[in-house]
Image (spheres, helix red, strand yellow):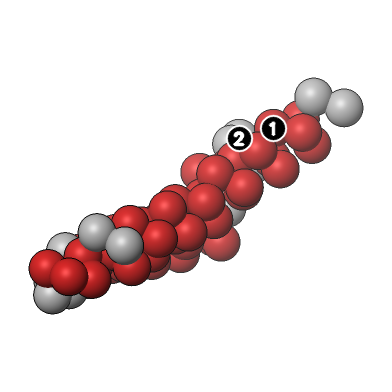
Amino acid sequence: MKSYQDLDIYKISLELFFETHRFSLKLPSYEKYELGSQLRRSSDSINTNIMEGYGRKSYK
């Protein structure tokens, strides 16, 4: 394993991020900005946490 991009969980979470992003853009306009933004940020944080955790493992 050379990087976090080789992890299966990272690939799954990246796919989930793209699906969530597409879905959030289809929300009604009154929910698109509040709920949609929260959905996009939370799905992105999964990937960010995986990258951060992998980086900490590498730099011990």
User: Marks 1 and 2: in contact by CB < 8 Å?
Assistant: no
Of marks 2 and 1, the one in the foreground: 1
Image position of 59 with respect to 30: above or below:
above
Q: What amino acid is found at the position of numbered circle 1 in the picture?
A: Gly
Which residue occupies the extreme bottom position in the image? 28
- Looking at the picture, tell me which residue is in the foreground, 15 or 38: 38
Percent coordinates x, y for residue 30 in the rendering:
17, 70
Which residue occupies the extreme right position in the image? 60
Q: Residue at x 71, y 43 (%)?
A: 53
Which residue occupies the extreme top position in the image? 59
Percent coordinates x, y for residue 15 in the rendering:
36, 62
Q: Residue at x 52, y 51 (%)?
A: 45
Q: Residue at x 24, y 59 (%)?
A: 33
Q: Earlier in the sequence, mark 2 or mark 1?
A: 2
Confirm whether residue 7 shows in the render: yes
Percent coordinates x, y for residue 2 in the rendering:
61, 35
Image position of 53 with respect to 56: above or below:
below
